[in-house]
Image: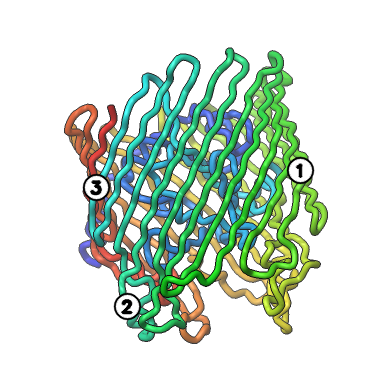
Amino acid sequence: MKQELILVALLGAITLPIAAYSETSMELVIVTPTRMPQSLDKTIADTTVLDEQEIRDSGAVDVPSLLKNLAGIEFYQSGGVGKQSSLFLRGTNSGHVLVLLDGVRINSATTGATAIDQLMLDQIERIEVVRGNVSSLYGSEAIGGVIQIFTRRAKGEPVFNVSGGFGSNSTQRLAAGFGGETGDTTFNVQVSRNKTAGVSAIKPSIVPAVNPDNDGYDNTSLSGNVSHAFDADNSLAASVFQSRGNVQFDNAFGATTDLDTGKSMLSKYSVASDNRLNGSWKSKLQLAQGTDDYQGFLNGVQSYYIKTNNRQISWQNTLTVNPSGSVLLGLENLSQHVTSDTAYTQTTRTVNSLFAGYTGNYDAHQAQVNIRQDRYSDFGTANTDLLGYGYVMNDSWRATATISTAFKSPTFNDLYGPPGWGSNPNLRPERSRNMEIGLHFAADGHRFDAVYFDNRIRDLIAADNTWTLQNLKATRSDGGEIGYAGQFGETGVKAAITTQNPRDTDTGQMLLRRAKIFANLALLQQFGIWKVGGEWQYSGKREDYDINTFARTTLASYSLVNLTANYDISKQLKLSLRADNLFDRDYMLAHGYNTLGRTLFVGLNYQQ
């Protein structure tokens, strides 16, 4: 601990005189907060963007490893890379965060969550994180926020890229791609393979009867896209993505000789037509399908399977009504179909949606209004709205405020599970009301954000005293986030701290696996052709269920230090190194489950 405190003190000493800075330009055009192109400095919703350079510099392997450095985001992962993860955004449940891949839903209709642990960063170009209720833009699940992940695109002359490396726990990574522009056509193809021997998913010291062998992970991913511009106003694009993961895990109630494995596949494809119908009207028509497919095996024999198909059609229109404001109008249809060896009483449902919005900037005033109606074939209608206001105090400072509503539809497990699951076809959607105010600074590449939020959720689905699911509970999560990023000469700094109180309002108990305080600090220093970085991650204590007794227990607080280094061998070839959990801390994100100790990784990247 003494070594760690010394390192953190050194980082802090260096960062104190540094103003806030973001490597991501404030003029960067993003789309997730409003579903319309908008520069980051005009965004009212609390938004973070991770660009391609930041993703590459991190040296992280998967999306959870990268996102856990952001304000408001917590993860638990049951045993290392590729194992089941849950993402908590501002203290909300994992099913309260909508994850989109290039605008497409890839979540499970049976659990309501997205297998974000199956998304490797070799395929990813940019991530936009919007915190707070945005169901009025995207529909169900967006109670805590939306995370939109964009796969890699290409521009300019066609070029190759190749990267690979190896590290602790017999980890191996290899990726290759080719893409660029030829005439009016842009294309890109990327493939990757990640493999690791891992560690035992469950701690044998806590569950002695568990299989103590290492539980590995093997992932093969592919992404591809092509876009053709017929003229300046009309284009057609198509994209595909597939991630196949073979994961080994432990069963706390199994025998020491049991080998539990699973095959997880996430996929999506989409076709989109972008058209400018006149000088002020842009239209986008998209057809897409996102799939979550999982098969479980015990000692080599399939034990269960479950698959969700999300078929989606959307027609979005953006109308520029004047130089200062734009109107959003859209229609969506979502058809969900579940295939499983579990006997669900119903396996399909459809959702028809209408949405509209307005975004305007008038001198010192910024405004955003959104409304949406979702009509479900099984439980009825959900209406949501958002009202946001921003005030530009001067060239550097802005104040923002939003009030919004959101909902989460009951899952197929909630509504249509087999007898004995407690399913209830009369369940209503969970609903939320969120209020937040923020203060933002941005000048000369510097950035500071401070946000207070208060998210109240009602009609949470929980079991009654007969073990039947009902709309029983209510929760509340209020707190604050402070984000800081800056550049001083060759030194870049990022820091974030979140304080929150996610609790059951009936009992006052803290929600499981969520801390009241967590923080991150990152430093990146350029030394000529070397770029060296350090990360410090801290999380306070959290409550969980004991893996053996199911009684409430407390997980200890923890802090980790990670190091990165990048060396430019040539303009095209770069060497990267990453050390995670440098001081080999033993900690738990979920009771009884292992986390990785000290790991090292060395990689090479070639970009033509």
Q: Give the SS element for disc 2.
A: loop
489 vs 458: above or below: above
How far apart in space, not on screen, are marks 3 and 2 (Cα)?
27 Å
Q: CB under 8 Å between callouts 3 and 2? A: no
Vertical relation: 200 (above or below) 206: above
Residue in the foreground of this view, choosing between 145 and 478:
145
Q: Is residue 215 left or right of residue 111?
A: left
Q: Give the structural element (helix, strand or loop) at label 3.
A: strand
Residue placed under numbered mark 1 in the picture: 353
Tag nearer the camera, 2 or 1: 2
Given the image, on which type of amino acid does mark 2 rest?
Pro
Mark carried by residue 23: none
Q: Is residue 508 left or right of residue 13?
A: right
Evaluate if marks 1 and 3 touch, with contact meaning CB atoms under 8 Å apart: no
Q: Is residue 67 visible?
A: no
Query: Mark 1 belongs to which amino acid?
Result: Ser
Mark 3 residue type: Gly
Residue 60: percent from left, percent from top:
34, 49
Mark on residue 212?
A: 2
Q: Residues within 10 Å of mark 1 (few under 14, many from 20)?
A: many
- What whole-number distance in Å separates the C-alpha atoms at marks 2 and 1? 49 Å
Report the side of 531 relative to 443 (left or right): left
- Image quarter where the C terminus lies is top left
Rate crowding at label 2 as few (under 14), some (14 to 19) or many (20 or more) other CA atoms within 10 Å: some
Of labels 2 and 1, earlier in sequence is 2
Residue 167 visible in image? yes
Give residue 199's quadrant in the image: bottom left
Residue beneath label 3, please?
A: 165
Say which residue appears at 50% left-offset and 75% top-offset: 544
Give the x, y percent position of residue 549. 49, 86
Disc 1 secondary structure class: strand
Q: Earlier in the sequence, mark 3 or mark 2?
A: 3
